[in-house]
Amino acid sequence: MGQIIAIANQKGGVGKTTTAVNLAACMAAADKKTLLVDLDPQGNATQGLGLDKNQVEFSVYEVLINEVAIRSAIRPTEMKNLFALPANRELVGAEVELVELDNREFHLRSRLSSVREEYDYVFIDCPPSLGLLTLNGLVAADGVLVTLQCEYYALEGLSELLQTVILVRDNLNSSLHVQGVLLTMYQHTNLCKQVVDDVREHLGQKVYQTVIPRNVTLSEAPSFGKPVIYYDLKSAGAQAYLSLAREIIARG
Ligand code: ATP
Ligand code: MG
């Protein structure tokens, strides 16, 4: 059966969406049928895959709240093997509306259950909070991939996130585990090297060998609606995400 991996960190701007879009594209390019679920009202992952977030017929919001069939909302992308469940601003409402509903943490999980067997990988791009949307992502997932930006405050908030993962595992989703911790936006500075050493010392084998460099190509590709491997395959960013995909496939 395929794997469902939630990409999460309640800190903003630490490379979650960049990782979701590019890792999903690399998996698809490796012949793995892949679905990217955009669970962030910002809709950045949707745009990064070349879909117009304001033109989608059904978004993840309708699937979570209005019981629109998930199959009606999943869209193919221009890339082979790569599919998207899009999001846009409407999703802001879900954070509030879910509170009133039964099994509020289980909506995404139950919707995904009818399609998960069709995919080798499902990635969930979580928003920068530990609210109900992220909880839905964690409850739906088998593994969580945590992105950490190589900066002085990298580990700030991490214990709260890991505590949430443990709470979800103990109460809502016993199969949840930390898939891995990914260091992003690495630069060759003493500070970055120190952060990488500290994180590896703290988290050991959970930290991926692959480190994503700070690479301007990664920040340019979304404005063309393309994952980086289709924008500039030779760039350091593209090569890093291909390496990450290989590492995750090898971890099984
Ligand atoms: P949010 O919490 O708002 O959802 P995020 O964690 O999803 O943010 P991204 O949107 O992936 O983070 O990245 C934040 C910004 O940094 C974006 O402008 C993105 O293009 C840029 N960025 C991400 N990773 C890299 C990188 N490795 N090199 C250069 N720029 C990057
Ligand atoms: Mg994001």
Image (cartoon, rainbow, N blue to C red):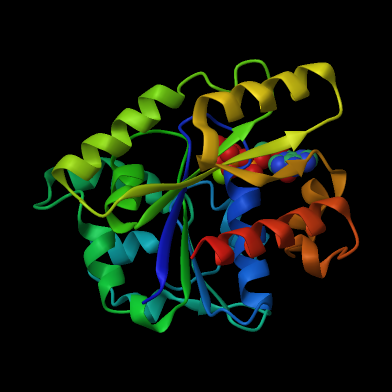
Q: Position of residue 13 (x, y in %)?
A: 62, 34
Tell which residue pokes out farthest to the left in this image: 102
Q: Position of residue 106 (x, y in %)?
A: 20, 55
User: Image height check: is 224 above or below 129?
Assistant: below
Image quadrant in which you'd find residue 108 = bottom left
Residue in the image at 20% along x and 51% along y: 174
Q: Would residue 54 be seen by someone viewing this image from the given angle?
A: no
Quadrant observed for ligand 2 in the rendered image: top right
Q: Residue furthest right?
A: 234
Residue at 60% of width from left, 17% of height from top? 153
Q: Is residue 154 something one can see in this rendering? A: yes
Residue at x 30%, y 50% (from the top left corner):
176
Q: Residue 32: x, y in percent?
A: 57, 78
Is 230 placed left or right of 116 in the picture? right
**Residue at 17% across / 41% down in the picture?**
170
Q: Nearer the viewer, residue 5 or 42?
A: 5
Task: Work out whether 85 lies above or below 133.
Answer: below
Query: Is 237 left, or right, of 199 in this rendering?
Result: right
Q: How many marks?
A: 0
Residue 155 appears left or right of 193: left
Q: Position of residue 168 (x, y in %)?
A: 23, 41
Image quarter of residue 246: bottom right
Q: Nearer the viewer, residue 56 or 212?
A: 212
Quadrant into which the N terminus falls: bottom left
- Left or right, residue 78 beside residue 90: right
Return the residue nearer the eye: 71 or 185: 185
